[in-house]
Structures are given as structure tokens and as C-alpha cells.
Image (tube, rainbow, N blue to C red):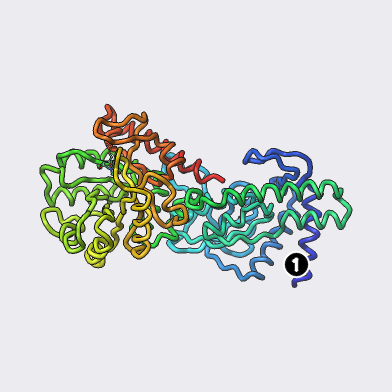
Amino acid sequence: MVSSYEQQRKELALKLFQISAFKFGSYTLKSGEISPVYFDLRVIISHPDVMENLTNLMLLFIKEKEIQCDQLCGVPYTALPLATLLSVKMKQPMLIRRKEAKTYGTKKLIEGKFQDQETCLIIEDVVTTGSSIIETTNDLRNENLEVEDAIVVVDREQGGKDNLTKNGIRMHSLFTLPYFLEILKDEGKIEDDMIKTIKDYISKSTEKKEVKKSATRLQMTFSSRAEIAKNEAAKELFKIMEAKKSNLCLAADVTKSDEILNLAESLGPFICVLKTHVDIVEDFSENFVNSLKALAKKHNFMIMEDRKFADIGNTVALQFSKGIYKISEWCDLVTAHSLPGDGLLKGLKEVIKNKEKIGIFMLTEMSSDGHLMSQDYSNKTMQMIANYSDIVAGIVAQSSQFTENQPELIQLTPGCKLDETGDNLGQKYNTPEFLVKEKGADIAVVGRGIIESKNPVEVAKTYRERLWNSYEERIKY
Ligand SMILES: O=c1ccn([C@@H]2O[C@H](COP(=O)(O)O)[C@@H](O)[C@H]2O)c(=O)[nH]1
């Protein structure tokens, strides 16, 4: 079986070369990089014999590696016919991922019948960085499908496998670029000079990717971070962000409960978190929190109470669960200072242990001018958090340094405005692009920039778009 597989693989490699599925010369890739080798597997649809041989080889491979799945999904477009043939031969259903959601009818991104937690095997033609597989995986995972394996026809061996591993996907390849070079060399179909040019090119581009590897959190997708989040509320928040394509938190700093509810109703579709300061609400009532919870459910956002607890453990436990506000009964997320020491976290944990999902955001730095949170204070806050990873969802910070190697934590960054002016009470603002790309914000908090604008809905849409685009640019490698 192994020798038949090897023989078929070699014959197919030569056939792919013969039909110009890969060529040598000078080509500009999707990333803008100039490459001496170019793969164009789209040509296979004109060669049914190659399609059949390729599918058979994939089948042998799947059997050999004992890869199990409930569904198949080809990355659009070249891998679609391969996934279709495999689906027929394996008698296994397949899914199709649309590149854009439909704007009418069901607005679905994934076509086909499936159930929660079913496993989906991804099929792709060529992998360079793995970004197309990651995009497809994100959309599948957003639909509660499990993605663990991807089979690709060609791995160019330029970092794609590592990127996929970081995103929890095992990549298996039928061919690699070095394999093609070897076979063509044996058959005398490629010059030594060309082999050297290609090898030099691969090692240079791999070196570049090694340098970029350091800032892991900033390059990871929210859905891959959902997989590794240790706090349940953080896990859910990452999923909401990815599903709604929003990393905008609205600071609903208004003093009447109706005003907050109106903001929640009109801006709810565009935000991932609505942040309250419940002690500024003049007409607080149980009805108000029930209505707010209902709107959070309707529009799929989380409620954060920006309480900034800062007292001994016993007191914060009481402040969190008792009094008029009974915060722990309605918030999903809450903020706290580390100033009093970890007794505060123990106190909050006592309350949280009886709840379903609550995440704490610890303040490491503030956005206001002249705050006293020194580098040492912030570092010690991070050390404190390390022992409470089950209840801490993230940090409130102004720089990416603290969570660079902790992608399971969410960085929430206040001080965001379309123009960069401050207020006259010490608040400092940055643009959405600067906050996400330079300061490492996962979520940006916007208050007055939206609620004091003439058209809060349109302005919120602008913030959401600019923040999300910045995140998408940030994760590109
Ligand atoms: O460092 C911090 C921590 C929290 N905040 C809160 O964010 C909003 C910002 O409102 P804007 O109107 O956008 O200035 C507000 O609720 C603060 O309490 C912060 O600004 N800085």
C-alpha cells in the first residue's frame, strides 16, 4: 500500500508539472512577495484524470492517517471540486463556505446541513501562510463546528503549518515544494541554478517569518484565542466578537436608565460589550437590569459594570453581590484594581463561584493623564492575575506589553475617539487604528465619541468598522 501510494504520488507530481499546475520563473504572490515558483492548481479542472488521481491519493492518505470527520469543506474556489469528489467517494456530506454572507434570505455563510460539534475536515489546494484555511476555520467554528485537521495538496513550506498549529489545526500535505524539486531533478526536468534560486528564496522567506513570530497575541485571531481562553466569559466574548465582527465596547455613561436602554437597543447590533457605571444611574431599578439583560441577549453583547473595585476582599464581595445594585446578578464582566492585593480577587472569586460565567478585567494602566500606575505596579498586577486565570478575563491597559505572551487574556483599552483630542479633565484619546495596531487593544472603549455625536448609530458603525479593519490588518502576517 505504501509503495503504491509513493508510486501514485510521484506520477501525479510529474503530471501536475506537465499540465503547468506549477511553473518556474518570477511571479507576484497574493502577499505581494515575488516568488520564483508559482502554483496554479485551478488548471486541474480541465484534466479529469488528474482530478480523479488526486482524489484517490487523498483517499489513501485519509485512510492511512486514520483521519475521522463528519463533514468536508473545501476552501473556495480551487479546492471545491476536490472536496466534492471526496465527499462522493467517502459518502460523507460536505459544506460550502461562502466568501461573503448572503445579503438576502438566510444570510448564511456556511451552506449545507450540519449539527453542533460535528467535526469538519478542510480541503485546500496550496498553502503559503495558511490564512485562507484560518478564515474558513473561523467561519466554521463560529457555527459550532469542530475543525482539527486540514488536508492540502501542496505545502509551500513557508510558515503555513506553524500558523495553522497556532490556530489549533493539524495540517497534512500530499506534496511539498522541496518534494517537487527532488522529483523534477531526478527526472532532469529542472536546472540546478533554478533549484538553488528556489531554495534560497524559501530560506529567506522563512527567516522573515521567524522574526515576526514574537508578537503572538497580536497575530492571533479572536476565534483561535477563544479556544485557549481559561475564563468562560472571555471565551464567550471572543466568540461574540468574531461572530459580530465587532471589537467595540460602548461606554453608556448616561444617567437615566431609559437612555441606557435606548442606546442598548439602537447600538446593540454593532457592539460586543456595553459598559455601565451603575452608580451614576439616577433611577436604578430591578426592571432596568432585567430589560438591559434582555437587550444583551437580543443583540448578543455582554454587559460590563466598570465598578473598579478597590477594597479588602470581604468588602468587595459585599459590594459585588449585595446593596441596591447586586452587580453580580446581572453583569457578565466587571473591573477591579489590584491595589489592595489578591485578597480582592479572593473576595470576588467567593461570589463568582456560584455564578455561571463572569469575567474580571484588572486595571494595569489607565488612560488618564498623570495616573500613578507605574511599570512596576502593572508588572505586579500581571503576577497577581497569574493565580486567578479561571476568573480573570482580561486587563484594562494602554499598551500591548503585558499580554504579549498571554493570548488567552483580552486587552480592553479606553480613550478612543475619531479625532485625537482629550477632554479638560485629563482623559487622553487615540484613534481606533492607533489603539488596535500600535497599543494592542483587542477591544476599544468609546463613550462620548458616540453618545455625544449627532447620529450615534452612524458614528458607532464607523467606530466598529475602523476598529475591526484595524484588527484584521493586525492579524495579517
Ligand atoms: O483607564 C480607563 C479606564 C476606564 N475608563 C472608562 O472608559 C470610559 C471612557 O469614556 P469616554 O467618554 O470615551 O472618554 C469611561 O466610562 C471611563 O470611566 C477610562 O476612560 N480610562
Instruction: Give the residue at x 50% y 43%.
Output: 474
- Which amino acid is tagged 1? Tyr
Q: Give 323 or 77, whichever is nearer the viewer.
A: 323
Q: Give 169 or 364, whichever is nearer the viewer.
A: 364
Q: Residue furthest bottom?
A: 1
Q: Residue furthest right?
A: 188
- Residue 200 pos. (x, y %): 75, 48
Tell me if mark 1 has few (under 14), some (14-19) or many (20+) residues whose alpha carbon lies within 10 angstroms of its own: some
Tag 1 residue: 5
User: Relative to residue 332, is residue 195 drawn left or right?
Assistant: right
- Residue 310 pos. (x, y %): 22, 54
Q: Is mark 1 within 8 Å of ligand 1?
A: no
Q: Is residue 91 above or below residue 224?
A: below
Is residue 298 something one can see in this rendering?
A: yes
- Residue 359 pos. (x, y %): 30, 57
Instruction: Give the residue at x 78% y 63%.
Output: 8
Q: Is residue 328 above or below residue 253?
A: below
User: Relative to residue 195, is residue 467 drawn left or right?
Assistant: left
Q: Residue furthest top?
A: 454
The N terminus appears in which quarter of the rendering? bottom right
- Residue 398 pos. (x, y %): 37, 44
Instruction: Give the residue at x 53% y 62%.
Output: 148
Is residue 355 something one can see in this rendering?
A: no
- Where is ligand 1, by quadrant? top left
Instruction: Give the residue at x 71% y 45%.
Output: 40
User: Relative to residue 454, is residue 81 drawn left or right?
Assistant: right
